[in-house]
Amino acid sequence: MIISKVEQNSPEWLALKLGVPSSSHFSEIITSTGALSKQHTKYMNRLAGERVSGTGEETFSSKHTDKGLEREPEARSLYEIITGVDVELVGVCYQDTKKRYLCSPDGLVGKPGGLEIKCPMMTTQVEYLRANAIPAIYFQQIQGSLLITGRKWWDFMSYYPGIKPLIIRVTRDEPFIRMLYSRLDTFCVELADVTKQIGG
């Protein structure tokens, strides 16, 4: 694993992510059953455009997403208190020196683990607590982070002030990780071809 410790959400961090498949978007490449996502062409076009233009399109932002980012350090500190472990902050992680795809963990935990923090709206937090399970929309992201980092487990934490946090440990789904690795390999080859086709 290759680690870059640039500050997340900084211009340097955004530059590293430009045109590179990221685990937070792996659901746009592969479904949870291993099939090709219906969004893969759109995502590929976006990444190819970023590679050629050197810029990224503006992404959706709202007061809720901004508030979630603001609460992340608070959630991380609470996680450290609850678990009694220190969380290492990193910018991005690559699987190897080829740097074909990446993940941006909310923290690395010791040698075996990682951390994904979500700070949703109050109603969503209650929904997550009632389900007491990893929301399906984050399955590919977390398994992708496990693939890239080679770690054994990843803790999912959902946090809203004044409400009990949800912390669930996710272990490696090896059959899915093998399918994801294969899909990523094909996706990256096609992405290079598309980039060349449009002038990159």
Image (tube, helix red, strand yellow):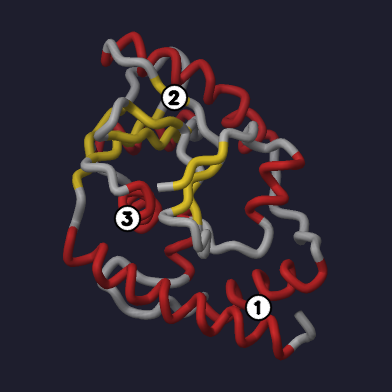
* Of pointers 2 and 1, the one earlier in the residue sequence: 1
Does residue 27 appear in this view? yes
* Residue 45 tag number: 1
Q: Seen in the image, is 54 located left or right of residue 187?
A: right
Residue farthest toward the bottom in the current orientation of the protein: 197
Q: Residue at x 23, y 40 (%)?
A: 153
Q: Earlier in the sequence, mark 1 or mark 3?
A: 1
Numbered circle sitting on residue 147: 3
Please report the residue visible at 21 percent of the width from the left and 42 percent of the height from the top.
152
Q: Position of residue 28 (x, y in %)?
A: 48, 68
Quarter of image, res 62: top right
For label 2, the crowd category at 10 Å Cα-Cα, with few meaning under 14, some 14 to 19 and many 20 or more, is some
Q: Which residue is mark 2?
A: 88
Above or below, 166 relative to 163: below
Disc 2 from disc 1: Cα separation: 33 Å
Which mark is nearer the camera, 1 or 3?
3
With respect to residue 35, does 31 lie above or below? Answer: above
Q: In the figure, residue 44 lies in which quadrant?
A: bottom right
- Where disc 2 sits, the SS reads strand
Compute the Cα span from label 1 to label 3. 24 Å
**Would you say residue 137 is visible in this rendering?**
no
Q: For numbered disc 1, what is the local secondary structure? A: helix
Q: Which mark is residue 9?
A: none
Residue 124: percent from the left, percent from the top? 43, 37
The amino acid at mark 3 is Leu
Q: Is there CB contact under 8 Å for labels 2 and 1? A: no
Q: Nearer the viewer, residue 65 or 199?
A: 199
Q: Amino acid at mark 2?
A: Glu
SS type, badge 3: helix
Residue 166 appears at what percent x and percent y? 30, 28
CA distance separating discs 2 and 3: 18 Å
Mark 1 near mark 3, Cβ–Cβ under 8 Å?
no
